[in-house]
Structure formats: structure tokens, C-alpha cells
Image: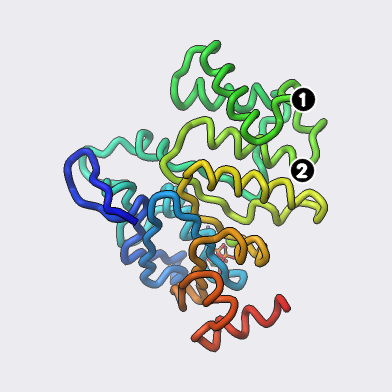
Amino acid sequence: MASTYNEKGTPSSATLSVRALHKSFGVLPVLKGIDLHVQRSEMVFVLGPSGSGKSTMLRCCNLLEEPDSGAILIEGDKLTGPGVDLNKMRQRIGMVFQSFNLYPHLSALGNVTLALRRVLKMPREQAESEAIAALTKVGLSNRAGHFPSQLSGGQQQRVAIARALALKPTVMLFDEPTSALDPELVGDVLDVMRDVKEQGMTMLVVSHEMKFARDAADRVVFMDGGVIVEQGPPEQIFGAPTQERTRTFLSRFH
Ligand code: ADP
Ligand code: MG
């Protein structure tokens, strides 16, 4: 992947960089020095046992958790520091959670429109047309007027993806986006994620959808105990992992 340059002319090879990230909760060290670089339009999958720090790492990437030390950079720009507008930086990061977090009293269209009005201060008419465009991208333009309770879990998650996408982030983070869904609804959400990738989005995805990771990920990262144990192309991590911990973890999914 070619290097990119940010507006300050600083060379930066990665769209999202996590550098020497440390985070503890009280006396419990959860992230023990994470270095991870996601290139433009790359989809990187993060696997690892429960409690290994995957969600904490994602949450540090948009400062839902404050790192103890280390840095997060978006296109070479530090997320925090003197003179940094945190709200502006956060707009460059889209986040999709396991629980879709839609407003129950707003329609699909209302949920996406509200984000555009609140975050980007867009006038209503423009926000609505952008929201329709985003809902169309996730195949839900015909459900725009439906409330969350009238949508399946998979459709609700697709609305949540549309909401994140509508804000035109630089990078999107997904934390187990399909793990709350009935199995028959998972495929539609994964199809949408594949479309988002094909449109060139940079994506960091925590998920245990192994078949999807194998098919669609550019790179797979295996985390355990707050460190990256190994990473590589999916065929290597799934086919010939070099670390015993990775082999043990993956054997549970066979
Ligand atoms: P994963 O997403 O890989 O399952 P998490 O990042 O959620 O792991 O959690 C890693 C560890 O950090 C776990 O031991 C968890 O209990 C702990 N942890 C996560 N969030 C908090 C918090 N807000 N306060 C205290 N401990 C936390
Ligand atoms: Mg988690």
C-alpha cells in the first residue's frame, strides 16, 4: 500500500496507527503494548479469547477509554494532544457495536438523520437525503420509515452501519457486530460489511466469524492477554499459525 501524507505533509503509511498502547483498569493490565497499523482500504480482523483486551483496544481508538500511554493516529494525526479538537478527530472514526444502540422512538431514517444533524450540523433536508443514501447502501431504503422494533436484529445493525457510514469516517471499527444476532441474520450484515469494504473503507473488525475472516479479511491479528501474539494474511493465520496460543484458540472453532 502506498504511503499517504496528511495535510501537514507528515509521511504516514497507515490510515489508523496504534502505537505502544497500554491500558490498565486499576491493578489489572489489559493492554500491554499494542502496535497495530491499518492501511487505507484494508480490512483487518482481530481475534482472541474473551477478556484478551479486544474491546478495550477498539474503545481506546476513539477514546471511549483513555489510554495510559501510547498513541492513536488517524492518517498521521494524533488523536489527542495540545490543540487537538477531539470531537473533530472522533468524527473520523465510525464505530459499530454488538448492541446496535438505535433510538427506539426514531425511525431508521430518523436515527441516521439525527447523527448527521448533531455531529455534522447538517441542515435537515441535506441530512435526510444523505441518510437515504446511506440506508440505500445497506439495502434498507425501503425500510426508512420503520422503527427499530419493526426491524429484525440484522436490519437494526445495518441501520447502525448506515449511521456510521453516513458520517463519512476515515476508518470504521466494528466490535462483534454479529454476535447478538440470530444465526440466519448474520449473513446479511456480513454482506453489508463486504460492500463497505469494496467501496474502499478502512476497517478494523473484532469478530469470530472465521469463515468471513478467511474470505474477506486482508489481515488477521490474534490477541491474547493484552498483546498481539501474531498476525498475517488469513491463509497463514488459519492455515499455518506459528504460535501455540493461536493454534489452541483456533482449534476450538473446528
Ligand atoms: P475482550 O473484548 O477481548 O473480551 P475486554 O477488552 O472487554 O476484552 O476486557 C479485557 C479485560 O478488561 C477483562 O478482564 C475485563 O474484565 C476488563 N475490563 C474491561 N473494561 C473494564 C472496565 N471498564 N473496568 C474494569 N475492567 C474492565
Ligand atoms: Mg469484547
Drawn side of residue 218 relative to residue 89, left or right: right
Q: Which mark is residue 146?
A: 1
- Residue 243 location in percent, x, y? 50, 86
- Residue 208 location in percent, x, y? 65, 64
Q: Residue at x 35, y 39 (%)?
A: 89
Q: Which mark is residue 153?
A: 2
Q: Please say whether residue 28 is visible from this viewpoint.
A: no
Q: Quadrant of residue 113?
A: top right
Q: Quadrant of residue 214?
A: bottom right
Q: Residues within 10 Å of mark 2 (few under 14, many from 20)?
A: many
First in sequence, mark 1 or 2: give its number.
1
- Could you tell me the amino acid type at mark 1? His
Mark 1 to mark 2: distance in Å?
13 Å
Q: Residue at x 39, y 72 (%)?
A: 32
Label 1 element class: loop
Label 2 element class: helix
